[in-house]
């Protein structure tokens, strides 16, 4: 039995969609709610290995910004909080928000910092779920697999194939099932925006690097699917 963490904007909705359509996998995996962190899962189920997805912090930021801008629709329908409403009245793209963190205008900087602390998925990055790079490395022996959002289909095949009698084919999924942003979203980040995000999410980038190292080790241990 595995515990699957649902780290925001790392492919968790699609991963749960796949698991739900593969009975053998569904019997072997418990999909945890968003509120669970790695520390909570390890403490509550000490004998159950954990699996989770990762994504680069700046891409979580961009995806999370647009997901909340449309209030999670069409997959979900989660109205804005007051802080989110204020944020989206000022910033219409993730680039604008990220650049605002170093704006010369003090009111813009304050608005940007408030938005970063208010927008769901923007305020809850990898650190909210995985604590620190040190913690992740210490917990590595209890991590069964780490799914990379940019290679999610192949990683799911490698992880799930041993659990499914006779193997399985890829599960069809549209943009709603994948909870994907529309393709016309402006995802470009300027050098200033990227630099600001690197400072803001410094701990998240350290966690991401540690997770990529662990993910590579776990894939090598399993071998090709």
Image (cartoon, rainbow, N blue to C red):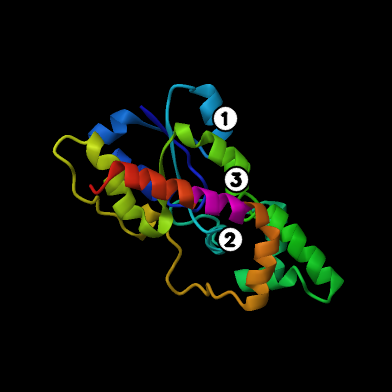
Q: Residue at x 62, y 49 (%)?
A: 124
Query: What percent of the width, then of the height, locates residue 157?
Result: 27, 48
Query: What percent of the width, then of the height, locates residue 156?
Result: 31, 47
Q: Residue at x 37, y 50 (%)?
A: 14
Sequence-first disc among 1 and 3: 1
Q: Main secondary structure of the magenta part?
A: helix
Please name which of the two marks, 2 or 3, marks the residue nearer to the observer: 3
Sequence-first disc among 2 and 1: 1
Badge 1 is on which residue?
Answer: 40
Q: Is residue 174 left or right of residue 150?
A: left
Q: Is residue 88 visible?
A: no
Graded by Cα atoms within 10 Å as few (under 14), some (14 to 19) or many (20 or more), the crowding at tag 1 reads few
Graded by Cα atoms within 10 Å as few (under 14), some (14 to 19) or many (20 or more), the crowding at tag 2 reads many
Q: CA distance from mark 2 to mark 3?
A: 19 Å
Q: Is residue 37 magenta?
A: no
- Helix, strand or loop at mark 1: helix
Q: Which residues are magenta?
A: 204-211
Graded by Cα atoms within 10 Å as few (under 14), some (14 to 19) or many (20 or more), the crowding at tag 3 reads many
Verify CB contact (< 8 Å) between mark 1 and mark 3: no
Badge 2 is on which residue?
Answer: 61
Q: Between 192 and 63, which is closer to the camera in this rendering?
A: 192
Q: Which mark is residue 133?
A: 3
């Amino acid at each position: 039995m595995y515990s699957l963490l649902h780290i925001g904007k790392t492919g968790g909705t699609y991963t749960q969609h796949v698991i739900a359509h593969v009975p053998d996998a569904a019997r072997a995996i418990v999909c945890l709610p968003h509120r669970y962190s790695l520390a909570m899962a390890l403490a509550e189920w000490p004998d159950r290995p954990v699996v989770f997805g990762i994504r680069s912090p700046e891409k979580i930021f961009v995806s999370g910004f647009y997901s909340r801008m449309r209030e999670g629709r069409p997959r979900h329908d989660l109205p804005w909080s007051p802080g989110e409403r204020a944020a989206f009245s000022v910033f219409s793209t993730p680039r604008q928000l990220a650049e605002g963190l170093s704006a010369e205008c003090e009111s813009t900087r304050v608005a940007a910092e408030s938005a970063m602390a208010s927008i769901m998925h923007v305020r809850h990055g990898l650190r909210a779920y995985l604590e620190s790079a040190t913690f992740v490395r210490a917990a590595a022996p209890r991590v069964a697999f780490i799914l990379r959002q940019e290679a999610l289909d192949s990683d799911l095949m490698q992880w799930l194939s041993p659990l499914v009698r006779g193997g399985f084919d890829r599960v069809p999924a549209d943009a709603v099932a994948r909870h994907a942003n529309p393709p016309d979203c402006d995802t470009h980040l300027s050098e200033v925006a990227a630099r600001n995000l690197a400072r803001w999410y410094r701990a998240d980038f350290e966690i991401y690097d540690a997770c990529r190292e662990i993910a590579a080790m776990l894939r090598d241990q399993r071998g090709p699917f």
